[in-house]
Amino acid sequence: MIAWGREPDVLVRLAQGQRLGTLFLPQPKSLVSRKRWIGFSTQATGSISVDDGASAAMKRGGCSLLAIGVRDVTGEFGKGDIISVLDSSGNEIARGLSNYNAAQVKMIRGCHSDRIEQILGQCPYQEVIHRDNLTVL
C-alpha cells in the first residue's frame, strides 16, 4: 500500500479499511529469471507463425511448440536464438529459444515430429521450441 504519510492517522485509517492510497497486490505466479530473460530482456532475431491449435496449446497447456503447428517462418535465426511466436492474426504470443535454425524450421514446418529425421537427416529435438525455453506473453 502506498499512501500519503502526512494524512492524519493514516496508518490507523488504512488498518480500518479506508481507501487512502494505492494497493499493489502480488502476482499469483512469478516468472523464473530464465523465462523473464527469454521473454523480455532481448530482441527476437526472427519469428514463427503458428496455427490456432498450437497457439491454444502454448497459452493454456504450457506445451512445447512442435513443427506441425508452424505455418510460416520470417527472418534468419540460428539454433539457440530467441524468436517470436505469432498467432494466426500476427500477434506475438510467446518468445523462445529455437532448437533449429530458420532454414531447418522452413523444411519441417507442418510436419509430424516423427518425420523430422527423414527430412533433415537427423532429429536432435522433437520440438521446435521446448516449453522449458518458452515464455508465453
Image: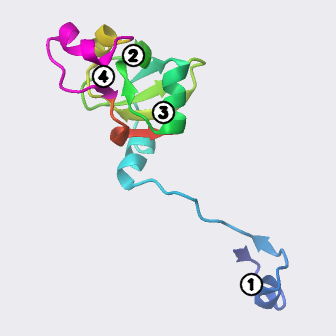
**What type is the residue that disc 1 sits on?**
Gly
Side of 41 where 92 appears, left or right: right
Q: Which mark is residue 5?
A: 1
**Start and end of the magenta stretch?**
110-128
Mark 2 lies on residue: 68
Instruction: Give the spatial CA distance, label 4 vs label 3.
Output: 21 Å
Instruction: Give the spatial CA distance, label 1 vs label 2.
Output: 58 Å
Mark 4 lies on residue: 77
Placement of 10 over or under 69, stated as above or below: below
Identify the element where label 1 is drawn: loop
Side of 122 where 9 appears, left or right: right
Indicate the position of residue 106 as horizontal and vertical percent values: 33, 10
Mark 3 lies on residue: 58
Asked whether the beta carbons under mark 1 and mark 4 sit within 8 Å of each other, the answer is no
Q: Nearer the viewer, mark 1 or mark 3?
A: 3
Indicate the position of residue 124 as horizontal and vertical percent values: 18, 25
**What type is the residue that disc 4 sits on?**
Phe
Indicate the position of residue 35 as horizontal and vertical percent values: 39, 47
N-terminal label among 4 and 3: 3
Along the viewing direction, whichever of 28 and 101 lies nearer the viewer: 28
